[in-house]
Image (cartoon, rainbow, N blue to C red):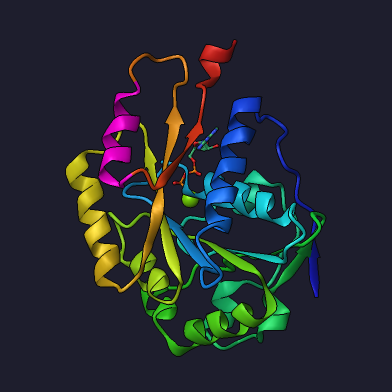
Amino acid sequence: MQKINLVIPDNMDYRTSEAYRTLRTNVLFCGEEINAIAVTSCTPGEGKSEVSFRLAESLAETDRKILYIDADLRRSVFSKRYQVTQEVKGLSHYLSGQEELGAVVCATNISNLHVILPGPVPPNPSELLGNEHFRQLMEKTHALYDYIIIDTPPLGSVIDAAVIAKECDGAMLVIENDAISYKMAQKVERQLERSGCRILGAVLNKVDVRAKGYYGKYYYSKYYGGDYSSVYYQKPEEIK
Ligand SMILES: Nc1ncnc2c1ncn2[C@@H]1O[C@H](COP(=O)(O)OP(=O)(O)O)[C@@H](O)[C@H]1O
Ligand SMILES: [Mg+2]
């Protein structure tokens, strides 16, 4: 098996790590049939990659076997963010039939956490994700891991996340506080529902914990019937 070393930034404050633990608990209580979770959002930059990876890391701490798949085939930030320097075989190799599952999975320096990186950008990401290989990948990995967390591109721009969510047991929507309209969130929710995927909840991200009112929090928790978690985020300039 390939092996990569991840350098995880140690910049999480107490409230944020507490929010991730709550999110993890919510996932654990979703039920036994929920193992593969697609994480998506309306627009880029809302925190899908950050939240999905931290969730995977947090689940791995519970001694369950976790697979994290970076399925943002177009604009992955993973290798740069976690300082992965070696070239490894990834998802696009598997989906195009060039490699077997065992050849694209990477063990990491985090115990219980395996990762599949996206691989080289293919010319036809949506098509690749929609093919039989992806379905088989989900079938095989279901048997091997307790949780499979999949990072996806934003649903507002490409269809990939819906294609991925279709093969998952549930989807999680990351919503950036004060950035997304109710209408936009609803549109993305409908798109996910049409793919036949269950929406597990929404994560309200980048909440400024010092702001008064929590307007956004109330707004979305109302919409999702309280089935959500907040990951608090302080803007760096406010911490200084
Ligand atoms: N909860 C958070 N705490 C701190 N930084 C965050 C948080 N969520 C996102 N970010 C930052 O916001 C930027 C966009 O996040 P990213 O996960 O790449 O978004 P997406 O995958 O939705 O495009 C990154 O610089 C990331 O480090
Ligand atoms: Mg991303």
| Place of residue 64 in the rendered image (x, y in percent of width and height, measured from the top left) | 72, 63
Quarter of the figure that contains the C terminus: top right
Q: Residue at x 52, y 65 (%)?
A: 31
The image quadrant that residue 180 belongs to is top left
Range of magenta residues: 214-225
**Residue at the limit of the structure toward the left, as seen here:** 183
Question: In terms of depth relative to the viewer, which is nearer, 144 or 80?
Answer: 144
Q: Residue at x 42, y 85 (%)?
A: 131
Is residue 41 at all visible to an observer of this figure?
Answer: yes
Question: In terms of depth relative to the viewer, which is nearer, 155 or 222?
Answer: 222
Q: In this view, does 150 lie above or below 122?
A: above
Question: In terms of depth relative to the viewer, which is nearer, 118 or 108?
Answer: 108
Relative horizontal placement of residue 199, taking residue 77 as reference (left or right): left
| Place of residue 68 in the rendered image (x, y in percent of width and height, measured from the top left) | 62, 62
Q: Is residue 9 above or below residue 195?
A: above
Decide whether residue 141 is among the magenta residues.
Answer: no
The image quadrant that residue 97 belongs to is bottom right
